[in-house]
Amino acid sequence: MLKTFAKPTQLQNNPLWIQQAAPGIWMLVVGAIALLLSVPVMFVLSHWVGRPSAVWQHLATTVLSTYILNSVGLMVGVGCGVMAIGVSTAALVTLCSFPGRRIFEWLLLLPLAAPAYILAYVYTEILEFYGPVQSGLRAVMGWQTLADYWFPNIRSLGGAIAMLTLVLYPYVYLLARVAFLEQSVHMLEASRSLGYSPWRSFLKVVLPLARPAIAAGTALALMETLSDFGTVEFFGVGTFTTGIYRTWFALGDRGAACQLAACLLLFIFALLAVERWFRQRAKYYQTNSRQPFPRYRLRGVSGAIAQMACALPILLGFALPMSVLLNLSLNSLSKQTGATTQAFWGFAQHSLILAGLTAGLGVAIALLMAYGLRLYPSRGMNFAVRFAAMGYAIPGSVIAVGVLVPVGQFDNAIDRWMQSTFNVSTGLLLSGTIAALVFAYLVRFLAVSFGTVESSLGRVKPSLDEAARSLGCSPAQTLVKVHAPLMSGGLLTAVLLVFVDVMKELPATLIVRPFNFDTLAIRVYRLASDERLAEAAIPAMAIVLAGLIPIALLTWQIQQTRRSFN
């Protein structure tokens, strides 16, 4: 011990002005990063008070009401659907015991790996007039045309609600299941001792205690619903996301596109405000229990119904569409030419480059911001970091507009200055480059990496910081040498989550991507839009397989949670 403290510390060797300036420098760096990442959101919001253009007035009198009604209809339909499926399946696998329960625990997460637009393409192939379902019905019943029978139109608002519900209910399932597991066993036993039936105990005790978690999961699903582009565009459902894209590219009015994006932001902020109010109005405090959670045993018909209730979302949301994609992929492999295979690997390479760059930068920035907030938890620092990390709640189309316009203005300003000063034209330095697209991804998905990194950093005891500082380590050295090794698992999780989100992202990629730099998501979108699903099957399968990586991580976490509470 004497030998350890006899060594001269590195801190003593640093000049005094460096020691005094370190906190200010750290706060300045984190604040600058937060400000830069907040620019797209602030730019879009600034257009809410801008002067309306002729295109905006045209949109307001023709299609704006349709966008609002369709967006509200999507939110209501998807909200009801994800709550019904997510809460019921979470309650069954957590509170009941029936054959296959343990395998359903993780199978119910699988639909989260498939983007909604891929399901939309597959179910359109299955359910349209020339698809196998209607063709089989006509062959069996002897029908000839649509005048002989009625069949629901998949390309409709109802179809979009169904597709989004099937892939987004795991948000509610995850949070509701954790909320059920963390409830006190004694409260459930007390309700049963007062004569409540299992069903009444669930409605009166268990479900109210899980309301904040259910509201949070539903809010996440609704934010994904409002940000969806591929599904609603393919089904011809006019929403704000499709309106932004059409206004930008078809009408060529960036200002009107920004005003539409500002309207969509108001929807998002209202949703976040309602969710936060709901959680504050439903605060429950309980003592956790490590006793085995009592499960109500389901036998016979009730057990079979529970199995069907859990199997149906898995079948419709993952097994059926993936089997169709796998069949199409195997059939298209025999028709692949060298040029087609080379093109596929080119798209895959573009996706991997973008996902890898964004994941690495996103986790590094999140680690820097989370550690800065840990060192200096002032109100200003907390507000800056939280505001910069709110991009996940904002649709990719909104962020794309908020990135492209300021970046274009910056490029034009630099070009004018260089021409006036040196008579040299610099052209577009950032617009239409990978840098602009990666920046849009960082704004969109920083919240994913920041939440994971902050949670992992919060599990490191503050005493380790004090010990490292007492041995002469600077804050940066403490972060690199002490915290990063302890957070390796959380950092890897954050990298994988951001990586997969970038692989699936469609609207931001579609708007900001460089010329002739298509990704797997863009390739699937273009082929499916041209009704060439067989050719789109292989890149679609690649996206889904990439999405299974975080599902494996979530499955492992569920297993750890079950061992902790059982």
Image (cartoon, rainbow, N blue to C red):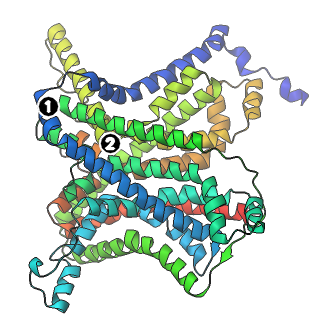
Indicate whether 420 appears above or below 213. Answer: above
Question: Left of 32 or right of it: where is 504?
Answer: left
Is the residue marked by circle 1 packed among few (<14), some (14-19), or many (20+) residues within 10 Å?
A: few
Please name the residue shown 49% across and 22% down the image. Answer: 31
Indicate whether 90 appears above or below 261. Answer: below
Image coordinates of residue 163 in percent, x first then y, are 33, 62
Please name the residue shown 52% across and 60% down the image. Answer: 173
Question: Left of 57 or right of it: where is 183?
Answer: right
Dividing the picture into quadrants, the one containing residue 382 is top right
User: Given the current orientation, which residue lies at the most extreme front position?
Assistant: 195
Indicate whether 329 appears above or below 356. Answer: below
- The residue type indicated by label 2 comes to Gly
- The residue type indicated by label 1 comes to Gln
Image quarter in which the N terminus is found:
top right
Location of mark 2 (residue)? 396
Location of mark 1 (residue)? 57
Instruction: Give the spatial CA distance, label 2 vs label 1.
Output: 24 Å
Please name the residue shown 73% across and 57% down the image. Answer: 184
Dividing the picture into quadrants, the one containing residue 342 is bottom left
Indicate whether 249 appears above or below 29. Answer: below
Image quarter in which the C terminus is found:
bottom right
* 248 or 424: nearer the viewer: 248
Image coordinates of residue 180 in percent, x first then y, are 64, 59
Q: Is residue 557 visible?
A: no
* 19 or 452: nearer the viewer: 452
Image coordinates of residue 280 in percent, x first then y, are 58, 39
* 317 or 536: nearer the viewer: 317
